[in-house]
Image: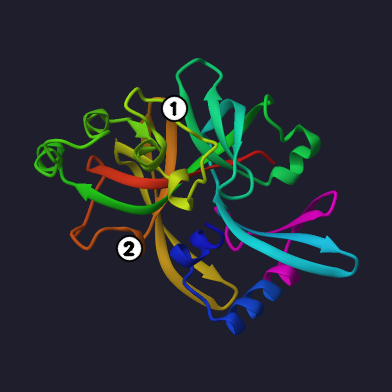
């Protein structure tokens, strides 16, 4: 899943342009967070967005391993790291500390935690759901018309606020609802399907230095674990979506990110 957010929200870059883009981020970065041989370079092109260049140091050489995105969030969730997942770096199965259940996430800026980033630790993170694919419906009636009659996980997803790892359940779950997390997992297994009513919809311009990119949207939905800011753009929406307003229903596959810095 490396660079998937870059591709979705900035665009796919050629190798030459990617190198130039990474060098620009290194030069413009306002913050550097180091832990052992790992280092994050953080650049904020606006007050809302962070571009995080993840790299490892090898003697005098800097190897860039990933670029991540995060946006400003006022939704802080508390969770316990149950199991590290071998999908992408710093991806975990976590448990809500208030006993509301488990979910999947990726830790952002994990270097800030040092040795505390390990199974069994209880942490707080500023939460954001980055939409990878979504559809938006005018109301509940329009959404209900799209439901198949029989499909694992569909019944649970009819409730607003639902969050479910449908890929993980379908690919690695048994008939009793048990998950085998020791099997080989794919990037899609980290995605969570959410359903909620759009609130506080805001259009955000995306300009990085002198380059203007497609705008993105921020909104909030209520979930079983608390309010969740979500981010999406035209590239992540179904072609069937012709427009949306607060009060519309979104059903989306998201990458759930927790900024712990």
Mark 2 Cα within 10 Å, few/some/many (few <14, many 20+)? some
What is the quadrant of the C terminus in the image?
A: top right
- Give x and y (percent) for residue 151: 20, 37
**Residue drawn at (32%, 63%), measured in percent from left and top?**
234
Q: Which residue does the numbered mark 1 point to in the structure image?
A: 226
Q: Which residues are magenta?
A: 25-48
Q: How many marks?
A: 2
Element marked by disc 1 = strand
Residue reaching furthest to the bottom: 16
Q: Is residue 32 inside the magenta stretch?
A: yes
Q: Quadrant of residue 42?
A: bottom right
174, 104: nearer the viewer = 174
- Give x and y (percent) for residue 178: 42, 25
**Mark linked to residue 131:** none
Q: Which residue does the numbered mark 2 point to in the structure image?
A: 234
Name above or below for residue 131 compared with residue 79: below
**Residue drawn at (36%, 47%), measured in percent from left and top?**
253
**Residue drawn at (21%, 57%), measured in percent from left and top?**
243
């Amino acid at each position: 899943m490396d660079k998937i957010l870059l591709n979705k929200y900035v665009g796919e870059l050629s190798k030459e342009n990617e190198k130039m883009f990474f060098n620009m981020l290194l030069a413009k970065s306002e913050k550097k967070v180091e832990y052992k041989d790992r280092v994050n370079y953080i650049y904020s092109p606006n007050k809302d967005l962070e571009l995080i260049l993840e790299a490892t140091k090898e003697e005098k050489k800097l190897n860039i391993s990933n670029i991540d995105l995060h946006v400003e969030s006022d939704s802080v969730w508390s969770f316990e790291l149950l199991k590290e997942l071998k999908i992408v770096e710093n991806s975990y199965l976590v448990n809500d500390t208030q006993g509301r259940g488990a979910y999947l996430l990726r830790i952002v800026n994990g270097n800030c935690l040092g040795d505390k980033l390990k199974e069994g630790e209880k942490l707080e993170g500023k939460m954001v759901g980055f939409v990878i694919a979504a559809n938006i419906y005018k109301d509940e009636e329009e959404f209900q018309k799209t439901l198949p009659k029989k499909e694992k996980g569909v019944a649970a997803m009819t409730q607003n606020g639902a969050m479910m790892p449908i890929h993980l359940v379908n690919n690695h779950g048994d008939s009793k609802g048990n998950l085998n997390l020791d099997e080989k997992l794919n990037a899609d297994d980290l995605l969570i399907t959410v359903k909620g009513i759009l609130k506080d919809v805001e259009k955000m311009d995306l300009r990085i230095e002198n380059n203007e990119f497609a705008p993105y949207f921020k909104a909030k939905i209520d979930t079983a674990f608390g309010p969740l800011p979500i981010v999406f753009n035209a590239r992540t929406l179904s072609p069937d979506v012709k427009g949306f307003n607060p009060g519309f229903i979104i059903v989306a596959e998201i990458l759930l990110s927790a900024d712990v810095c």
